Amino acid sequence: MIGPYVGRVEQSIRTQPPGPRRRPPNGAAGAAVPGPGRAPETAGAPAAPAAAPAARLRPVAGPPAAARPATPRLRLRLPLPGRSEAPLYGRRRTGRPTRLTAIGTGVAAVLATLAVAGLDRLLFDRLGWLFGLGYLVVCFQLAVRVRYVDLLAAPISGPIAFALALLLLGPVTSSGVTAQVVALATGLALRAGWLFSGTGLAALIVLARFVAQRRIQRSR
């Protein structure tokens, strides 16, 4: 009985083409073709199950990385040493008064002082306490609003505006240049307290601003 099976095996080896043998698909019925090195199958023996295809290896994905919280970007503007002070005080900023140049300070001083003097002359027909209080307010505003590079314009433009208001709106007893000069000198002497008070206030504010700015520059 072994002889016929041996003959079949040799015949299958001779007639089979060279190369890898095809495996039957999964679940297909039929006897497998015996190859070299394999034992012959019996007629009643069940067919061997086909080898399961090798599972493809896939990288195991780990847990997703925790999303990083978005941090706000901070933009810091550092002062440059070569930057001048003019554009710093020339721009309008929220919460700070508008800075005046030297010419703007002089014009504002003359216009504001003349307006206060004209109001006092219109209401009381003379230059009295209303003119003096108005001059103090004008000197304070000039010293606060002038820019840093033109600090000296505030205490200088105030007395000039005061004298100009007395010259134009002050009482004059007679006509002529001499009378105008005498009236101006008299008016300055009678109102010297208001004049020195307003000018001194402007000078103190300007000096305080100068010292504070120098300390800021040294701390940098």
Image: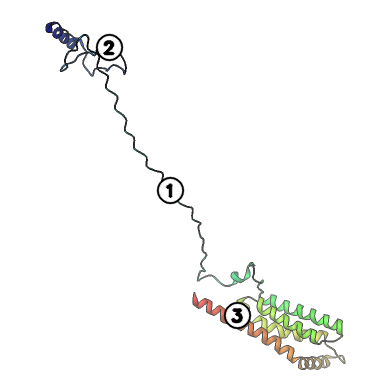
Where residue 2 sits, quadrant-wise, is top left
Foreground tag (3 vs 2): 2
Residue at horizontal 70 percent and vertical 89 percent from the top: 196
Q: Which of 183 and 15 is in front in this view?
A: 15
Q: Is residue 98 above or below residue 26?
A: below
Is the Cβ of the residue at disc 3 closer than 8 Å to that at disc 2?
no
Please report whichever mark, 3 or 1, sits nearer to the chain's N-terminal start.
1
Disc on res. 209: 3
Quadrant of residue 163 within the rendered picture: bottom right
Q: Which of the image's four quarters has the N terminus?
A: top left
The colour style of the image is rainbow
How many angstroms separate mark 3 from mark 2 (CA)?
107 Å
**Which circle marks residue 66 in the picture?**
1
Could you tell me residue 78's position as x and y percent?
Answer: 51, 67
Residue at position x 86%, y 85% in the image:
124
Which residue type carries mark 3? Arg
Residue 52 pos. (x, y %): 29, 23
Judged left or right of residue 1, residue 89 is right
Residue picked out by circle 2: 30
The reply, left or right, for residue 142 in relation to residue 214 is right
Position of residue 87 measured from the top left corner of the image (x, y, whole percent): 60, 69
Q: What element carries label 2?
A: loop
